[in-house]
């Protein structure tokens, strides 16, 4: 190895300098060369050494010459490598590359030196892929070779070959069990370079590190955990790391503080309600097993309770030894160390989830739980079977006539300086401004009211009084009392001791106990007879304690209320409230409402499914009904259009026929224009003017007034028909509302009538003057007549004959074509109006038709959405069910944490 070190450093020539001082190596080697020219082997060594000296002194060409003449096979590969180095120094890089690539040797040292030189050469040439290939080959050949892995890492990092850098760190950390390389790997992990890698590659490295250094193992495992947390490979990582930890002994080897935190946070995130149980059921058991085995002291309670809760729901995933270990840990740890806010946060998360799913259970439910969380008062519920006795006791505690015996609402009274009355309903909280309104609101059994007022006894004993509707009938009493039992910290049952204790009264109390097993129930027996015997009182008390052995019982004479009796009732209340752990019970109560909330949501889900099904059917009926209405409306529109158009056509044809009949007569009557003194040269112009005048006068004075009168009647008739149509549509709208509670407004466009009136006014009052040449001078007869006129002007005595002939011509002429032309010209605008009637009728009904079509479109869109929702609910019930199951697991876990001494009953 010493010789190879010399060859690497180009210091082989030092072997020839032993014992020689103050003489330049060139001279020493030259003298040796001259003295040993006949010994070829030795000359190769000297030449090789001379090349080193020339290289050292930057005489690269001479060095190359010397190395090229080396013939000893042991030196030839090294000489070739040096020749390549020299060409590199001369910046002849391509030549250097060829020499490097041409080296053949069995020496791993030389091979790796060549690879490193090629790496440097390629890097300087920015041939990145070639440089990458060379350095990777060098690492594979001998990763222990000095500087190889360090240079490789530096290059990978500088050129952003992140994958290669990570692979190098994993390989070196695993191979060499090097904490330094594990630190490098952790740095890559923390920079996010590994979060796309298959987790198995990292767990292989972790297996090695576990046996090397546990603290560093924990640090790296936590770093990897965090890097995968929000990525696609997170679940695969959880499977890998938990399988690895199952193979290791986490107990009594190391305090796994950070790892325990990861277990806790992962468990919480998996049970956030965002994942389906099928996706986490293979992960949770191993996670919990490892957590129990490696939990920190701070996490021991939550880890063990999580195991027990999961095992109850999914018992096949846990070994009995793990469950036993969890139970032991739970007992050793003692009672819970969490506060009520943790439970309230669970309640809030369920509420938010429910709202996100469109299932709002109403404000009142949330308000009750918020009261449990925020109120520090002891909530004493008053119930009874007789309204007078119950209200009397409540008023004694409130210090005034506040409670009305007829009240049906549940009222929470608490002590405050400022009076305030709130009506709490599912829709919202409303402030009640005066006592009269309070009494009115109190008539509803479903109402919850909070009455804040000054009440000394409440203040002194730090209690709030919950006054409930009197228990008269079991079914009704449940509505008024049962929903708020878990709001109460204790219940005071007021009974009339003057009458025998009935089984019905005790049954009511037992039913309450069954519904709220942990609620302390005490009894106040009111008497009007102050002379009752002790024996009678003891008999009543004994009957009560048969069912309620721990109950406190107070005999209270309601007819003799004085300060001493008030002190007795105050002392009785103090005995009920004494020693009560408000914080502990607050947790129990909120947990109860969490369970109740889950139960209600499961019921709500079934209700929603049924509602969706019913709503789809209902919408289908509406669509069918509306489609039928559209067809009816189209028939009505067609019928109205035909009737309207037909009536108008008859009026128009009457006008047209009148004109066709009258115009020829009017034209013939113009013969009277021809006189003896008529200028026959211009007679045709005069006749045409007169004919046009008479026709237009007739139209304006006779035809149009008659037509206008007929049209006014036509429009009035249409208005009546339109109103009947609108009335029919109004009845149709009312029918929809009555049958389907669907408000559809069907309006017709009566503007059409105003448009018709305007059009008719325009056509009949601003008449276009019709001008037509009935007498055309170029016709044969007329030409003759005109020429004759010129002739007879010379012969005046025959002018009368001409007049007679011309008159006969005018009177006998066929004017039918002219009449048709004049009528057609006049009727053109009325023809256009007729063509627009159908469009106007369509416009009259269009708004109603569009409204019906819009209703169908709206219903069909809703049905499409509901069909999709219903299909998802039926095909993937786990999307809804699994989050509630997980919330139930969390509730169950809190219950285990609440009770470390005995097994708590399972959540049904």
Image (cartoon, helix red, strand yellow):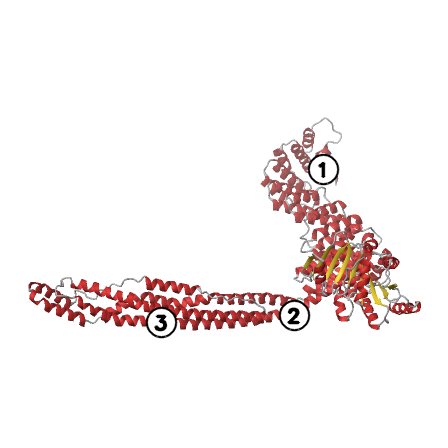
Residue 113 in view of the camera: yes
Q: Residue under circle 1?
A: 6
Look at the numbered discs 3 and 2 and tell me whether their residues touch, using CB distance below 8 Å: no
Q: Nearer the viewer, residue 853 or 486?
A: 486
The label shown at residue 610 is 2
N-term mark: 1 or 2? 1
**Residue 528: image x %, image y %?**
86, 66
The answer to whether residue 626 is above or below residue 577 is: below
Q: Residues within 10 Å of mark 1 (few under 14, many from 20)?
A: some
How far apart are the alpha carbons under marks 1 and 2?
90 Å
**Residue 763: image x %, image y %?**
34, 63
Quadrant position of residue 313: bottom right
- Secondary element at image label 3: helix
N-term mark: 3 or 2? 2
For the residues carrying marks 3 and 1, which lies nearer the camera in this image?
3
Q: Residue under circle 3?
A: 649
Residue 306 in view of the camera: no
How far apart are the alpha carbons under marks 3 and 2?
58 Å
The answer to whether residue 503 is above or below residue 100 is: below
- Secondary element at image label 2: helix
The answer to whether residue 81 is above or below residue 805 is: above
Quadrant position of residue 828: bottom left
Q: Residues within 10 Å of mark 2 (few under 14, many from 20)?
A: few
N-term mark: 3 or 1? 1
- Quarter of the image with the N terminus in it: top right
**Residue 721: image x %, image y %?**
44, 71
- Secondary element at image label 1: helix
Look at the numbered discs 1 and 2 and tell me whether their residues touch, using CB distance below 8 Å: no
**Residue 254: image x %, image y %?**
82, 51
Give the residue at x 37% y 70%.
648
């Amino acid at each position: 190895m010493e010789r190879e070190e010399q060859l690497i450093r180009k210091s082989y020539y030092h072997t020839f300098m032993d014992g020689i001082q103050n003489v330049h190596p060139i001279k020493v080697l030259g003298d040796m060369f001259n003295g040993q020219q006949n010994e070829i082997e030795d000359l190769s060594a000297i030449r090789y050494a001379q090349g080193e000296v020339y290289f050292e002194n930057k005489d690269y060409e001479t060095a190359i010459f010397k190395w090229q003449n080396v013939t000893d096979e042991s030196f030839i590969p090294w000489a070739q490598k040096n020749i390549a180095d020299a060409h590199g120094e001369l910046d002849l890089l391509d030549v250097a590359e060829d020499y490097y690539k041409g080296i053949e040797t069995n020496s791993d040292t030389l091979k790796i030196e060549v690879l490193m030189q090629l790496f440097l050469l390629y890097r300087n040439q920015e041939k990145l892929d070639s440089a990458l290939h060379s350095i990777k080959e060098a690492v594979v050949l001998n990763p222990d070779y000095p500087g190889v892995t360090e240079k490789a890492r530096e290059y990978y990092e500088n050129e952003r070959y992140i994958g290669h850098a990570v692979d190098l760190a994993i390989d070196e950390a695993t191979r060499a069990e090097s904490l330094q390389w594990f630190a490098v790997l952790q740095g890559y992990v923390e920079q996010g370079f590994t979060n796309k890698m298959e987790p198995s590659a990292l767990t292989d490295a972790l297996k090695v590190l576990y046996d090397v250094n546990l603290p560093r193992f924990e640090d790296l495992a936590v770093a990897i955990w965090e890097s995968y947390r929000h990525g696609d490979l997170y679940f695969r990582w959880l499977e890998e790391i938990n399988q690895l930890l199952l193979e290791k002994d986490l107990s009594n080897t190391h305090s796994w503080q950070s790892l325990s935190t990861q277990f806790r946070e992962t468990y919480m995130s998996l049970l956030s309600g965002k994942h389906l149980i099928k996706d986490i059921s293979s992960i949770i058991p191993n996670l919990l097993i490892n957590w129990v085995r490696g939990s920190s002291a701070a996490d021991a309670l939550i880890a063990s309770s999580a195991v027990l809760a999961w095992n109850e729901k999914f018992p096949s995933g846990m070994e009995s030894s793990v469950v036993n270990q969890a139970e032991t840990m739970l007992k050793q740890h003692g009672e819970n160390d969490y506060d009520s806010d943790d439970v309230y946060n669970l309640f809030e998360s369920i509420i938010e989830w429910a709202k996100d799913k469109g299932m709002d259970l109403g404000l009142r439910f949330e308000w009750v739980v918020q009261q449990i969380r925020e109120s520090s008062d002891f909530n004493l519920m008053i119930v009874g079977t007789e309204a007078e006795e119950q209200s009397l006791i409540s008023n004694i505690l409130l210090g005034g006539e506040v409670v009305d015996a007829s009240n049906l609402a549940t009222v929470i009274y608490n002590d405050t300086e400022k009076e305030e009355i709130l009506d709490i309903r599912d829709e919202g909280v409303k402030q009640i401004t005066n006592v009269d309104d309070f009494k009115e609101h109190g008539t509803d059994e479903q109402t919850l009211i909070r009455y804040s007022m000054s009440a000394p006894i409440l203040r002194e004993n730090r209690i709030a009084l919950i006054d409930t509707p009197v228990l008269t009938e079991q079914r009704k009493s449940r509505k008024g009392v049962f929903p708020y039992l878990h709001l109460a910290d204790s219940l005071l049952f007021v009974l009339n001791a003057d009458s025998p204790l009935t089984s019905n009264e005790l049954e009511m109390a037992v039913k309450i106990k069954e519904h709220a097993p942990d609620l302390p129930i005490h009894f106040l027996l009111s008497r009007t007879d102050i002379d009752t015997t002790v024996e009678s009182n003891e008999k009543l008390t004994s009957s009560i304690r048969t069912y309620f052995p721990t109950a406190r019982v107070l005999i209270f004479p309601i007819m003799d209320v004085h300060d001493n009796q008030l002190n007795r009732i105050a002392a009785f209340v103090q005995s009920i409230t004494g020693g009560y752990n408000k914080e502990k019970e607050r947790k129990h109560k909120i947990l109860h409402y969490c369970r109740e909330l889950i139960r209600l949501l499961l019921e709500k889900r079934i209700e929603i499914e049924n509602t969706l099904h019913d709503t789809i059917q209902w919408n289908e009926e509406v669509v069918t009904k509306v489609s039928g209405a559209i067809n009816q409306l189209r028939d009505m529109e067609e019928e109205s259009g035909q009737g309207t158009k037909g009536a108008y056509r008859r009026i128009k044809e009457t006008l047209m026929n009148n004109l066709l009949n009258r115009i020829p007569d009017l034209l013939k009557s113009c013969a009277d224009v021809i006189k003896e003194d008529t200028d026959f040269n211009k007679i045709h112009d005069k006749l045409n003017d007169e004919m046009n005048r008479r026709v237009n006068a007739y139209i304006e004075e006779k035809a149009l007034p008659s037509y206008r009168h007929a049209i006014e009647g036509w429009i009035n008739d249409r208005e009546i028909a339109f109103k009947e149509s609108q009335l029919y549509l109004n009845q149709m709208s009312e029918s929809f509302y009555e049958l389907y509670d669907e408000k559809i407004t069907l309006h017709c466009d009566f503007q059409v009538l105003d448009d018709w009136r305007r059009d008719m006014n325009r056509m009949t009052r601003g008449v276009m003057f019709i001008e037509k040449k009935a007498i055309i001078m170029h016709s044969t007869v007329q030409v003759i007549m005109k020429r004759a006129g010129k002739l007879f002007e010379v012969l005046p005595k025959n002018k009368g004959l001409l007049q007679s002939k011309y008159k006969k011509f005018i009177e006998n002429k066929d004017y039918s074509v002219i009449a048709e032309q004049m009528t057609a010209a006049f009727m053109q605008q009325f023809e256009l109006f007729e063509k627009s009637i159908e469009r106007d009728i369509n416009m009259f009904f269009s708004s109603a038709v569009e409204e019906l079509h819009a209703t169908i479109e709206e219903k069909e869109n809703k049905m499409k959405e509901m069909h999709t929702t219903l299909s998802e609910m039926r095909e993937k019930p786990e999307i809804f069910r699994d989050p509630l199951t997980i919330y139930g697991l969390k509730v169950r876990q809190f219950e285990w944490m609440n009770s470390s001494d005995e097994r708590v009953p399972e959540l049904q």
